[in-house]
């Protein structure tokens, strides 16, 4: 059976690649492959674009095992990569133990996981690290930042890391999560179950549910959040907080 995706998926990925200058000929791209649906879709989509000559780049995948129980079985991930003709690396870590000892959860865990992937990418000579964050992730991060840290920001589709000299790219920036779910029947892989004990209990999950609830009441809520996170939108903010003793 010929592996393929409907045209609209390739169009949105290539649009992001062009608009944000994510991929250039000759890039060596490492895909962060958690085993979940989003990263499996990203790996599948990029592998097809490489296979059919649309993206003249080298592609590989890495999985970071965080060390939660039950352990992640790497065999289905390896088989999927073999089917796509993509080199696969599985790295075991003790990130789960560190996170539990420090009593820090999602943000710290994500920081350690990204750090390990960045280091591996640099060590192996990859100049790009592709992550599977989609449009919903960006909007949720934008609202989370306002609510929980008092900052107006979200992650960028493309970020250069000075320390590792690796550029992080997010080719799914224009895809909604529901579109990825709808595409899973095309992907010859069964996403692995999330073995994180904090899954569904995070600030991100709360914000995801809040956005869904508000959008169900008013269909413009999500589109307006998406517009607000774009540079160039009207901004009218209070001046910096007054400091005691300042003239």
Image (cartoon, rainbow, N blue to C red):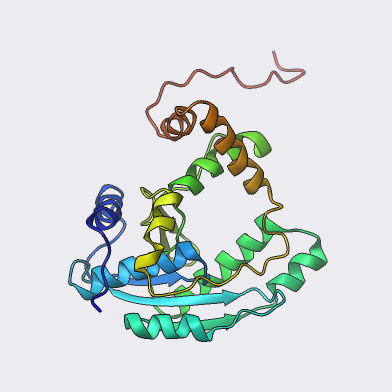
Image location (x, y in percent) of residue 116? 57, 72
The answer to whether one can see residue 128 in this image is no
Query: What residue appears at the point 50 percent right and 17 percent down from the top-left corner?
Result: 236
| Residue furthest out toward the left | 53
On the rendered structure, is 130 left or right of 242? left
Number of on-image labels: 0
Image location (x, y in percent) of residue 84? 33, 80
Image location (x, y in percent) of residue 8? 26, 52
Camera-side residue of 145 and 38: 38
| Residue furthest out toward the top | 247
Camera-side residue of 116 and 130: 130
Image location (x, y in percent) of residue 79? 43, 85
Q: Reply above or below: 40 against 150.
A: below
- Is the N terminus in the top left, top right, bottom left or bottom right quadrant? bottom left
Q: Reply above or below: 183 against 204.
A: below
- Is the C terminus in the top left, top right, bottom left or bottom right quadrant? top right
Query: What residue appears at the point 54 percent right and 42 percent down from the top-left corner?
Result: 140
Query: What residue appears at the point 45 percent right and 27 percent down from the top-left corner?
Result: 220
Displayed quadrant of residue 58 = bottom left
Q: Reply above or below: 58 against 7.
A: below
The answer to whether one can see residue 188 in this image is yes
Displayed quadrant of residue 56 = bottom left
Camera-side residue of 85 and 162: 85
Q: Reply above or below: 59 against 11.
A: below
On the rendered structure, is 205 left or right of 6? right
């Amino acid at each position: 059976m010929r592996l393929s995706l409907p045209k609209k998926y390739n169009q949105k990925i290539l649009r992001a690649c062009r608009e944000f200058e994510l991929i250039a000929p000759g890039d060596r791209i490492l895909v962060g492959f958690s085993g979940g649906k989003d990263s499996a879709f990203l790996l599948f989509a990029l592998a097809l674009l490489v296979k059919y000559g649309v993206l003249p780049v080298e592609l590989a995948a890495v999985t970071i095992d965080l060390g939660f129980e039950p352990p992640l079985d790497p065999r289905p991930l390896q088989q999927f990569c073999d089917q796509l003709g993509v080199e696969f690396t599985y790295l075991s870590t003790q990130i789960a133990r560190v996170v539990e000892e420090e009593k820090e959860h999602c943000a710290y865990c994500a920081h350690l996981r990204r750090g390990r992937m960045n280091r591996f990418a640099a060590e192996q000579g990859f100049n790009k690290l592709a992550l599977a964050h989609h449009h919903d992730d960006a909007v949720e991060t934008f609202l989370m930042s306002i609510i929980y840290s008092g900052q107006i920001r979200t992650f960028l589709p493309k970020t250069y890391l000075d320390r590792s000299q690796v550029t992080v790219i997010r080719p799914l920036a224009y895809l909604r999560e529901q579109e990825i779910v709808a595409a899973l029947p095309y992907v010859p892989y069964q996403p692995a179950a999330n073995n994180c004990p904090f899954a569904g209990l995070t600030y991100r999950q709360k914000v995801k549910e809040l956005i869904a609830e508000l959008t169900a009441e008013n269909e413009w809520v999500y589109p307006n959040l998406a517009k607000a996170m774009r540079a160039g939108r009207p901004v009218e903010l209070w001046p910096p907080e007054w400091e005691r003793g300042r003239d």
